[in-house]
Image: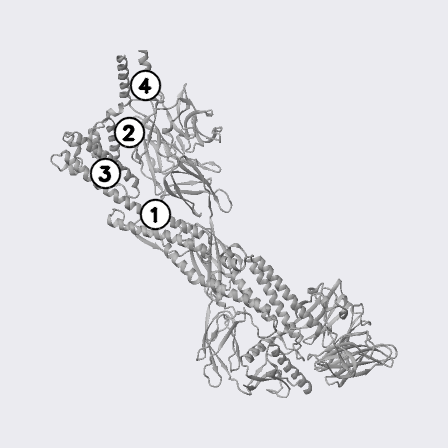
Amino acid sequence: MYLKFKYIIILFLLSLIVYDSEAQHLRYKDIFEVVSSGDYVLGYSLLFEYQKNNPSFANTYFQLGLISYYNIKKADPFLEYKKIKYFHYNIHLFWSLAKKYINDDNSEVSRNRKYFLNVPELAQIKRVKAEDVLRFIDTHLQEVDEYVRELDKIYGLFYQMVSDYTACVDYYRTIISHYNKLKDLYLAPESEIFPRLDTLQRLFDSTMSMYELYKAALESYPLKKYNQRLVLRPITLYRLEGVTSTDFLSDTLLFWDYGQWNKQTRKVITSEILKLRSNIELHFNKLTKTENSFLRQTKYSDDYTGYFLPTQILFQIEKYDINSIVGNILKYKKAKTDLLAFRLHKFNDTTDTTVKLVARANFYSQEKQMFHSLDSMLDVIKSLDNEVNIHKYKDFFNLHFSDGLVSYITGERHLLKDLERKDRDHFKYFIFRDVFNYSFDSAFVMYRGDTLRLYPWLGHIAPFVTMDIGHDPLYNIYVAGVTQRGGSWSVFVAKVTKGTVQWLKAIAVEHGYVVPIVRVFPYTDGVVIDVYQVDNQGKGYNAFYRFDQLGSKGFTLRSQVRFVPRYIYYDDINGYLISAYKGMDRDKWYGSDSLVIEKWEVGQKHLVWRHSFAQDGQLVNIQRFDSVYYAFVNYTRFSDQSGRAFSSNSNSVGVVRITESGDVLQFRPLQKLNGIYLIYALKLTSRKIDLLGFDSAPFPLQKRKFDQLPQLRSIIINKF
Amino acid sequence: MKKVALIYTLLLVSLFSFGQDTVKLYPIELPGQQLREISISYDGTHLLLLTNQQDAYYLYEYVRDGRGNWSEPKQIFSISYEIQGPAYSPGNNRIYLAVKMSGDFDIYYMDRTQEGWTDPKLVDSTLSSFHDERSPMIDPQGRILYFSRDEGEKEPCTHLFFSVWHHGHWQKPQKLVAPINLGCEDYPRLAVDGQKIFFISHRESYKSFDIYYTKKLTQEIYTTPQRFGFSHNRFDEISPAYDPVLNALLFVRKHKGELKVFYVKMNSQFKPEPVSVLKGKIVDKETGQPQQAVVSVLNPITNSPLSQRTTRTGQYQLILPQKTKYTIEVTGRGLSTSFLNWDSRILDSTETEQYNFQLFSRVNLQLNIFDKLIYDRLSADIKIIDSLSGDSLDVEPQELDKGKYLIRLPIGGYYSVHLTKENYNPYSFALDLRVPILYQNLEKDVDMEPRLQRVVLKVVDAFSQRGVETEVEVVSKKTGARFKTKLKTDAEGNVVLFLKKGDVYEISITPRGYTFYSQDLSLEEDTTPPQEIVAKIKPLEKDLKMQFHSITFELNSADLKEEAFPVLDQLVKFLKQNPGIKVEISAHTDDLGSEQYNQKLSLRRANAVVEYLKEHGISSDRMIAIGYGESRPLVPNDSDEHRAMNRRVEFKIIEIK
């Protein structure tokens, strides 16, 4: 049995020999030559092979340790740190084995002395002994231990510095990726930006700290090749600079100066932005307070002015945020206070009777522009309402617009519409009071025991039947109508000032059995009345009578036009009378009768010109602009004297223009007023006219209650 | 004896078996031609097969499906030159191979494109010698190229070499140390961790090429190569390839007279270390189309590329060893740059992560142009110059809104942007887009400085000639803009105004106790503006008269013309500024028309002026309206010009409190 196993083992060992036949070719002498020649790479591998078969040959380990030593010394401490650590581990392993085998066999060194002489320190010893080799090993181990120990420290600091700076670059990139512009970053909410800046600062401080420690460590234990100096590069171009890392092994370490950038950024934010926000808050609150104060105010005065918003604050906002949403909100609120102050002007006071209608009309025209401007401002604010813009003023919007900007804008529009409607109603009131002499309170005065109504009242018989009233620019009221005595009609005209009849004059009519129609047209220095009456032949005609302020009778004039007078324009300076007639029925204000317009020179009682136009519609009124008379009409059909016809399915507005000398210019339809029923054309300035109307016909006025009338439309156009 | 033999055999088998499984035929469909070599990608998803028929060589590609099965072979390349040793680079978009184009084998590469594979290109002349370079294989990080080289010995015999890619070039090849190169070595093939290397070697004791395995410890240190026990002693095993999916080693060997592909399953000792596989797409940010780019793995310490590869298909794949930190940079000529910091921790198994990059070729530069003084937005002419060539760029700025422009500029250029506007100083700035560009949207505020004209305004008392301290109002007649800050003269009556050229201004002074002053100042191009303006203002005193010809009325009417309003507004301000004065407002006519008529008309006109002032807040007790008609002409009414002079409104101070 034993013999059988013996054969097996021999055969097995033979196989091993066959298997490992390659190793038998390595001779130590050859290996030593390779190592001594400096081919440490090859030498290392060969030594490794050799020691497998000769595990107790001390010199193998000595040489392996030596190669490890050279590798440690030669390796780049940063680029080949792992390699150094690898060989450091190995050097201990190899040299501890070398020491072991040298100690185990005292004659090892002397026997293989020649293989220890490829080291200068040993080569210069006459007869190298074991203790020499051991001393050599210990010295060199100490040396590499110290080197690796120091290197560990230095490398640790260096690596941490690299790590921190890389994190810095990365974090900086993250910060700027959120903000397209540096100014957007400045305007980021503090709760958002400061923590980010803090983190960046922390990373940068850590980097600088590590650098200092690293430098100090290098000073304490210099590494050849590494004596770097740090240069901090300022970041001047946002998003183009500061976004790349650096070569940490170059002689000059180029770091982006995130610390300085951080500092500058903070400085801007704390010194300018925070102050800006504080100012925004201050003025916003003051503006709101002013708005509320004006909205509560009921007393009218010319002394109110809008809130003074310093332009400096808008400048500051623009500096960081052009077309800023907050800037626009402040502008809006400021404009709103201007409007609210403006509304409190006495021009808007319905109890005031000192202001002329034209001035009021200009006031409302200006106010309309202000409303329009405010509406446009709200449009601008709405267009700027997006996440990016709101985010810049996050805290501000959370505090003041918690329901959102859309809700605010809607609310403001409602408020403005409401205010505008109220003021337009005021304007309507003034128009009806001053132009149409609308009676709001059914006022009357007493004259010698009889009631004189200050509003048209045809239902009443005796003694004074008021047919028409008007007032002059000083608000003296002229009342005209008819009175019947003994079955015969006559005409009266009276002047009423502050509720007292100043005078009352009677005018006999030709045919007293037919009720005359009287119209009154006050002017600056008196009144002209027109009496439409019937002559003894039964033909109608118009007679004009003028009375001055004291009641003295002036000119009388007779026009053969037998239509009802709708409008008279008396130019007392130049002595001209323009009169316009239409239809025979006083109450039929919109008809298909011809429109007749004539001009009289009252001094000579001379008819200067007369023109007739075919019209389905109504004459509204006449205004004079620079020697041209403008007669404004409502129509569905109109033909001028050349026969050219204008027509439409629904009411349209147009203007007939006649020069002083009577030339009729081209009839002009006013497209802007399509769908509107004109009630009055008010001359605002030498170039502007305010066309007032309704969406539906409002006549007859006195039969319609004022508050049932629709909203007054006002369209201002420049003279054409 | 039989038992001895049996035991011996068992021992031998156990000795030589190396712990491996049995050799089997690899389940793959072979194309018709004669098989030559095989190669598998690092991720095990692609396989290359080299065949030849007569003088032609063919390369086939197989793709693995989700169940691990190979597709049918697809021919991707054919050539009449001899080719050898094809192997994929990481990402499978490049193949390295040896081609015998010029008499000897040299190392070439082919890239995958959307249209197919490019023709072979020489890798680098540094790698070439006068003899054969064969069997190239690039490591998973793309840094080291292994290959075999014939050193010109008597008998053909190759050894293993490697070259490191450094600073954009392949370095001079170095020979791998013995005992790797001990015989004749070829086909260096790596596993995905870059440490385990398979190669074939023909050593003295053996009659054929066998497959060996070594492990790399450092660049210079490898473990002793071990021969695989399954190696046949008579037939060559060539073209080893590691299949990570099966954990098997493939090779080509003759079988029944033909070359076949075999495989052997490996035990766990040969399984590669886990790695991180990062892959994804690189696309054009705007179009979403695949983008050709250069993908670099940067040394985090030096920030220089450790490896770099170009992808033409927009697909990339990186194999990153565990326990390392890298920065990945993706860029290209004329393209933006994208960075990704990669920190590969210790892994239990290979992990694959997907990360897509978006690159763009143009930046969107938004310019916000505004007036430096008043922050009004401005339109301007914008010109872009290529600073290197000096040529004007054919780029049209898009005006998004007034003063807001968008300019799309190609990356890679160095530009200078020039803005010009009439009456403003030109503005220029440089924009260097040659630096790595990470962000597509850049925005810059441009504050253009208006050209200003210095004008000294001196306000003096018309009698004493002394300077008067007062506020000055300056309004642009073109824009209506007012000076935002209050202007005030000093004690000498001086104030320096810096006014914008090209504009026309109205300068108004309404000092308390003096008449007011108003003057237009034109700084338009065709005018020579004064350096100094002297405004002489009269101190208010009783009977002081001011004449206004610009308060005009409609013909034969007392209706004020709109042209009169600015002067009337100034009068309002004047009266408000001097609340203690009372004025007589008189209107005068020429001699046309009757005396009575002129008298009446002038009175009406005076009243119209009073009415206007009253409506603007001046108390009626401070004003008296008088019509003088034609009774007080300034000059004889003997010409149209003189009559125009006589038609006027006058203000006379009748009381000062």
Whether pointer 4 and pointer 2 mark residues with C-beta atoms closer than 8 Å, the reply is: no
Residue A426: image location, x then y, percent: 67, 70
Q: Secondary structure at mark 2?
A: loop
- Mark 1 and mark 3 lie on one chain; the one further toward the N terminus is 3
Give the residue pinned by disc 1. A162
Judging depth in this view, the residue of A10 and A416 nearest the camera is A416
Against A307, is B363 above or below?
above
- Mark 4 and mark 2 lie on one chain; the one further toward the N terminus is 4
Q: Mark 3 vs mark 2: same chain? A: no
Give the quarter of the figure containing the C terminus of chain A. bottom right
Q: CA distance from mark 4 to mark 2?
A: 26 Å
**What amino acid is at disc 1?**
Val
Q: Quadrant of residue A373?
A: bottom right
Give the quarter of the figure containing the N terminus of chain A. top left
Answer few, some or many: residues within 10 Å of disc 3's Cα (few below 14, many 20 plus, some between 14 and 19): many
Whether pointer 1 and pointer 3 mark residues with C-beta atoms closer than 8 Å, the reply is: no
Whether pointer 4 and pointer 3 mark residues with C-beta atoms closer than 8 Å, the reply is: no
The chain letter under disc 4 is: B
Judging depth in this view, the residue of A684 and B632 nearest the camera is A684
Whether pointer 1 and pointer 2 mark residues with C-beta atoms closer than 8 Å, the reply is: no
Q: Secondary structure at mark 1?
A: helix
**What amino acid is at disc 4?**
Leu
Q: CA distance from mark 1 to mark 3?
A: 28 Å
Give the residue pinned by disc 2. B179
Residue A397: image location, x then y, percent: 52, 58
Q: Quadrant of residue B209?
A: top left
Q: CA distance from mark 1 to mark 2?
A: 39 Å
**What amino acid is at disc 3?**
Tyr
Give the residue pinned by disc 3. A69
Give the residue pinned by disc 4. B11
